[in-house]
Amino acid sequence: MTPAALPVLLVTEDHDLRDHITWLADPVPVLATTPQSLTDQQWHDAYLVLVGDRSATALAEQHPAHRDRVIVVGHDPDDAQVWERSDSLDASTVMVLPYDQATLRRRVLYAERGSDPTCTVAVLSGCGGAGGTLFATAVAMAARRAHHRVALMDADPVGRALQLLLEEVATHQAPDAFDGPGDEAAPLVCATRPVGVCGGIDPEDYLPVLHFLQADQDIVVVDAPRGPSDAAAALLEHSDLTLIVVPDTQHGIASAARVLDWVTGFASRTAIVVRRCTDEAPPPDKVANVLHTSLLGCIDTERADCDGEIVVRGSVADLADALVDDQFGLG
């Protein structure tokens, strides 16, 4: 991994945005310029390019060469035109401050190393038995089918659901177990306690294990605890996306509301997955409206064991595949 000579280029005429991003990026150096002063060499050499949303149109009119890792950064989440300005520049994604501040800082820190950050997705159950562990497993398996190096981290403080779902388990006490070829033949890495020991990784080990996995994997999926704690909050702060599986029952929705109350204080991006349990339930979009959050999609629980290997089918597998195909909505 070679450090980037020019980690971050910021193109903006907005002095407040320039100061904000310079502060956010510290200690990573940021070269700030305007669309009028930008050179082809700067545009080509920068590992990561950030473009102020109000400068995106002016920059697009100069027809810069297409390149990867261009992020349009704005301040107003209600400004629908920011997406049009982003499209005119063919940007990778749009981030809105301060909502995407944690995610943007991670991108900047990795840019200094000359690499892209590992995508980390935390999955929680809105209530006991909602299916969070199953959906986390489905996402990890979908990522592996898409030829990513992927790890599944067990941070569930009770039970041993992952041990029951996956036949072969690599424990975080044995770092050699994580070594493997970085291609499609690499096994799904599962970080949990040894087989037979109830509960997931000790909370005090959450961040060390997560950082270990992030250093060697493309995607880390965390089966996260739904109860509030400092350790759980730290996990969410270090995740790019937090998903909560919500049964569409009255109890499930009420329980998920309590989970969201604390989750939204730490997660950079949050969405729910509605698990259909009854025909009399409200439509999934209404469940999302009640919970004041985004809807990722709906699932039915369809699972079968085949020759000792877990098989995730139907709507669970379909939604997991769609999430991976969409790059987790992170661009």
Image (cartoon, helix red, strand yellow):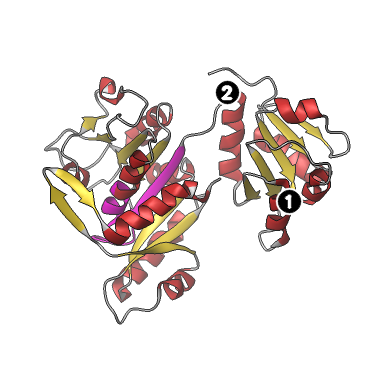
**Residue marked by disc 2:** 113
Q: Position of residue 178 (x, y in %)?
A: 30, 25
Q: In front here: 10 or 62?
A: 62
**From what the image shows, is residue 233 above or below residue 298?**
above
* In magenta stretch: residue 127: yes
* In magenta stretch: residue 33: no
Q: Classify mark 2: helix, strand or loop.
A: helix
Q: Which mark is residue 36?
A: none
Say what amino acid the circle numbered 2 marks. Answer: Arg
Range of residues picked out in magenta:
119-137
Q: Position of residue 285 (x, y in %)?
A: 45, 72
Q: Position of residue 61 (x, y in %)?
A: 83, 46
Relative horizontal placement of residue 276, taking residue 59 as reference (left or right): left
Q: Classify mark 1: helix, strand or loop.
A: helix
Residue plotted at (77% across, 47% down): 56
Question: Based on the displayed image, in which of its 4 quarters is residue 23 positioned?
Answer: top right
Residue plotted at (70% across, 39% down): 50
Front tag of 2 and 1:
1
In this view, which residue lies farthest toward the right? 36
Q: Position of residue 109 (x, y in %)?
A: 59, 30
Question: Based on the displayed image, in which of its 4 quarters is residue 207 positioned?
Answer: top left
Q: In front here: 321 or 55?
A: 321
Tally of numbered tags: 2
Looking at the image, do the residues carrying marks 2 and 1 touch, with CB atoms under 8 Å apart?
Answer: no
Relative horizontal placement of residue 197, taking residue 89 as reference (left or right): left
Say what amino acid the circle numbered 1 marks. Answer: Ser
Q: Is residue 86 visible?
A: yes
Distance between mark 2 and mark 1 Cα atoms: 29 Å
Residue plotted at (80% across, 29% down): 40
**Residue marked by disc 1:** 88
